[in-house]
Image (spheres, helix red, strand yellow):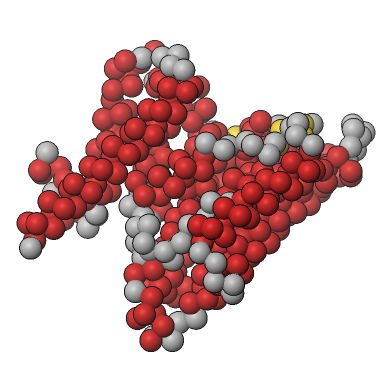
Amino acid sequence: MKSVFGAHRRLGLSSNLIQLVVITVLIFVAMSLIAPDKFLTYYNFESISFMFPELGLLSIAMMLAMLTGGIDLSVIGVANMSSILAGVFFAHTLGADSTASNGHQMLFVGYGVALSLGIGLLAGALNGFLITRLRITPILATIGTGQLFTGIALVVTGGPAITGFPAYWAAIGGGTLLGLAIPFWIYVVAAIGTAFLLSRTVFGINLMLIGTNAKAALFAGLKREKMVFLSYVMTGGLASMAGILLSARTNAAKSDYGVSYLLQAVLIAVLGGTNPSGGKGGVLGLFIAVLALMFLSSGFQIMRFSIHLIDFIWGAFLVGVIILNVVLEKRNGKRHA
């Protein structure tokens, strides 16, 4: 075991990442042995590829907020509000018109995607304004705006879900490209783009520096407020992207969809190696953490566990691994002391 966790020295990977890989492999092997005829099937992995991106995008959004030492608890509100307003747009433009040409429908779906993303960016900008200009603590600001966005969604819908999205919208959440789910491709593009931004651009490197040492960033002349503001704008955009995928997969949008994703996204961000105090995080760790949870959830669903029990197991698993990380970090600290 020591040789496994010591591999990070040779590969240049963090011990946290190596640990996540080992845990993910163990979960995969365990589920494969318990129910090989159901778990090791194309249908199961296809299902995972459709559901994975929603939580994956929300986890990236949460990581971006945490990199600056903040947090965004409004992501679910943003996701639902943006998809609901897109549904309202479709109802008032396309309506029940089944005679509209494919080109006409595709054009309006494009408008709907742009509208949804635009709403997410504006919502993120509101969060950024409250945090950077009005100096409201991120957790309080985003709790408040999260309730605001959910309230807007409730007022618009009156409570029930909006259904009947155009076929091309549903294709975003249910279609495939080159044998893989379209949502998964969208996630891959977003993840690679975020990883490139954080590791290969001045903005990303400075964003890390702000979270690592705010005073040093200030003395270096970095425009902290502007960068924090932009990080929340990006968080809002990613949340609305997750909302698009969720509504496209279910062909519906509701104010309380994906509520359980919120705390899962926070815990996955931490589990994936993001420092809640800022300055440390990476997309690869998030990908592995979400994959581990998808394998775990899929296996228990195959074994017909109660959905409430699955939520409990998810929470227990995440908390357990986080505690393990803390214990290992303390041991490593004592060794190097």
The picture places residue 59, in percent across and down from the top left corner, at: 47, 48
Q: Residue at x 24, y 54 (%)?
A: 14
In the drawing, does residue 294 fall left or right of residue 106? left
Q: Residue 198, relative to residue 153: is it above or below?
A: below
The picture places residue 333, in percent across and down from the top left corner, at: 13, 58
Q: Where is residue 117, by image quadrant? A: bottom right
In the drawing, does residue 239 fall left or right of residue 274? right
Q: Foreground residue, 51 or 102?
A: 51
* Count of marks overlaid on the render: 0
The picture places residue 227, in percent across and down from the top left corner, at: 51, 73
Q: Where is residue 199, by image quadrant? A: bottom left
Q: Residue at x 57, y 50 (%)?
A: 75
Q: Foreground residue, 326 or 3?
A: 326
Image quadrant holding the C terminus, namely: bottom left
Residue 189 visible to the viewer: no
Q: Residue at x 28, y 25 (%)?
A: 29
Q: Foreground residue, 188 or 229?
A: 229
Image quadrant holding the N terminus, namely: top left
Q: Residue 173, relative to residue 222: is it above or below?
A: above
In the drawing, does residue 187 fall left or right of residue 40? right
Q: Residue 249, relative to residue 193: is it above or below?
A: above
The picture places residue 7, in percent across and down from the top left corner, at: 16, 49
Residue 206 visible to the viewer: yes
